[in-house]
Image (spheres, helix red, strand yellow):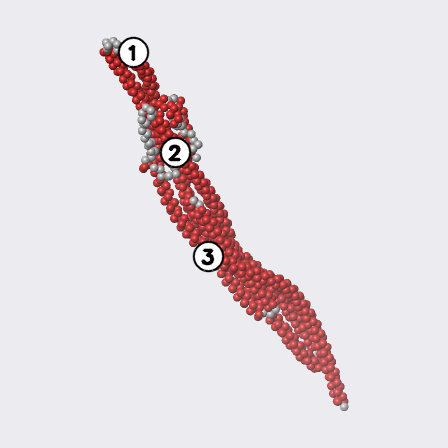
Amino acid sequence: MAVLSADALRWHVEKQRAELTRELDDITDRRDLEEATAQSEAVASSLRKRHGDAMAELGEQCEGLQRTRAKLDKEKQSLRVEVEDLASALDTLQKAKASADIQLKKLEEQLSDACSRGDDLQRALTEVTVAKNRLSVDNSDLSRQLEEVEGRACQLTRSKSLSKQSLGGALSSARQECDLLKEQLEEEQESRQELQRLVSKLNTESTHWRSRQEADALQHADQLEETKKKLMSRLQEAEEASEATQAKCSSLEKTKQRLQGEVEELCMNFEKASGCGQALDKKQRVVEKQLSDWRQKSEDLVAEVEACQKESRLHAAELFKLKSAHEEALEQLEALRRENKAHQEEIGDLTEQLTDGGKSAHELQKAKKKMEMEKEELQGSLEESEAALEAEETKVLRLQLELSQVRTDLDRKLQEKEEEAETARKNHQRALESLQASLDVEEETRAVLETTERARKSLETELQDTAEKCGLFNNQLQASAGARRKLEVDLQTLQQEYEEVQSELRGAAERAKKAGCEKGQEVQLKELGVRLDEAEQAGFKGGKKVTQKLEGKVKELELELDSEQKRHGETVKSLRKNERRLKELVFQAEEDQKNQHRMQELVERLQNKMRAYKRQSEEAEEQANMNMAKYRKTVHELDDAEERADIAESALTKIRAKRRDSFSKGYSSVRPPPPPPPPPPPLFTSGQRLTLASLRVRSSPPQGYSTPFAGLVRSPSSAGSEGRDEKLNDDDTESVNSLIPAYLNSLKKLMID
């Protein structure tokens, strides 16, 4: 029993010891669990705090992304509205293009008509040149005729002066002889009257003596016969002397009339020759002036043609440069399109990477949307550039229409103008065509400049977007680096906590070793060691899981960081490329602006030239109209002068006929009428006729002008009353000599008018 009691007591003690060890293990386990729970709660609180911070950051990012999304939605709506507007504008532009094509066909037809008109004008120009050559030949002939007429006029003036001198001497001598003959005639008439008286006296005496001597029976018959014979002889001598004086008087009158007719004819011939000489001088001056004007115009036109050719060469060189620049811009545009395709491929790669990513998938999707929006913006900018190109094409077509209208107006004016302005208008048309070419080149350069400016703006927007992307990527990299640092800090804290737990476990084991001296304590220590191993294994498993998760996150973040670094490098490279391209485009844009300024200056110069050409053409039109008006006026005045000359000539012929009738009536009692005077010699022979029928100069003055020879032409009444006893005084000759230059001056004024 004692043994049983001792065994029981021992069993009871062992049981109590086991319970105590169990309780001690429970207490240690509880304490360990409490410490572990406290540590886990601390870790969980820190993780919750970090999670809350991360969630707050994510919430802020989500809010920012929502704001950007709303902004993008608004932009999308505005872009849709713009797209609709652009679609409507595109429809209108297509309609305008169709109408412009129709107008272009019409303009081509008009151009063909204008070309045919130009050919007609060229033929007219050749005809004008032929007429000009013919006129030059006529001018040479007229100048030769003028020289001949001047020589003849000089000869006529010399002969006139000589004839005037001779006629003056002859007239004075004839007057003296006429006076002497008149005195002799009077003396002879007196002697005749005396003789008649003597004859009558002798007859009376003879009858007296006959009656007286009849009675004497013929005593003195012989003496009477002798006296009678003497008286008859004296009577015959007196009659012969009177007849001789009458014959002398009639011959003197005839010579006087002949000399007067010759003087009149010489004066009229001189007046005709002087008038013709003045007209020919004036015509020669006009022709020489016209020839000098035509030479000056031809020289100016040759200079203008050379200048236009030089300008056309310069325009062709500038056009070649602009074409090369346009081709380079097109190549750059194709390169930008290729880069756009590369960006699209990169966007596809990014979308694939975003699908593979975890938390950053949403952000990458947003980046994808942003890139798609950028793509749409680029497409919109491209569409805008195409629309701008179409608008520029419409502007070019409109300008071509305006230029074609101007060309048609000029063609109409060319048809209305005279032959003298046709060559100048051709040059104006050529200048207008060169201006049209320069305007087309300017429009092309403007279109190229606008496309380059749009490309530059699009590249600037792309650079800004890439810079924003780089900033976002940098922010993401910084956030991922901060998260990595946080995870590393958490890992370090977990490692420290694990080391602290291990140190505490070692201390507990040492304390258990120190406290446990008995087997129960050893068993408890073993159980505690097993529990500790289990706890360590569980802690290791949990820590390993956490560390594995954290390491997986770290690896994922490292992979994302590497990919983001690669993307950042690629974006930096593309940014540098874009910067280089931007610099090149800016330089090219500056060069294009310089070229545009040059083209604008050139266009302004050409427009000034066009205005000058228009002004010159208007002045030429005005001058041509004035010349035509003067020509019509002179033709009308010449017709009037011809009519007046014809009337005066008919009046002169009537006066001459009346004068002849009066002279014939005055001399019909003594002698038969003298033969009519010979007609005046013609001024020009048949080979020396003037070619222009409109310039016929008559010998008689027109109506309204007094002739200086009116005093020399007697009326029939005066001729009948005076008869043979008419005299010409010295005053009449002086008045005639003074009236001749006045009449010549009046004729000069008439010809000038």
Quadrant containing the N terminus is: bottom right
Q: Residues within 10 Å of mark 3 (few under 14, many from 20)?
A: few
Q: Which residue is found at the position 68% from the left and 74% from the top?
A: 505
Mark 3 or mark 1: name the one nearer the start of the chain: 3
Q: Give residue 257's position: percent from left, percent from top.
A: 34, 26
Q: Which residue is found at the position 65% from the left and 64% from the top?
A: 63
Name the secondary structure under disc 3: helix
The number of numbered badges drawn on the structure is 3
Q: Nearer the viewer, residue 388 or 406?
A: 406
Q: Which residue is found at the position 55% from the left and 66% from the top?
A: 347
Residue 105's disc number: 3
**Which picture quadrant has residue 532?**
bottom right
Is any atom of residue 77 visible in this view?
Answer: yes
Q: Nearer the viewer, mark 2 or mark 1?
A: 1
Q: Which residue is mark 2?
A: 650
Is any atom of residue 595 visible in this view?
Answer: no
* Residue 547 falls left or right of residue 405: right
Q: Give residue 339's position: percent from left, percent from top.
A: 51, 62
Mark 2 or mark 3: name the one nearer the start of the chain: 3
- Given the image, on which type of amino acid does mark 3 rest? Lys
Q: Residues within 10 Å of mark 2 (few under 14, many from 20)?
A: few
Mark 2 or mark 1: name the one nearer the start of the chain: 1
- Given the image, on which type of amino acid does mark 2 rest? Ser
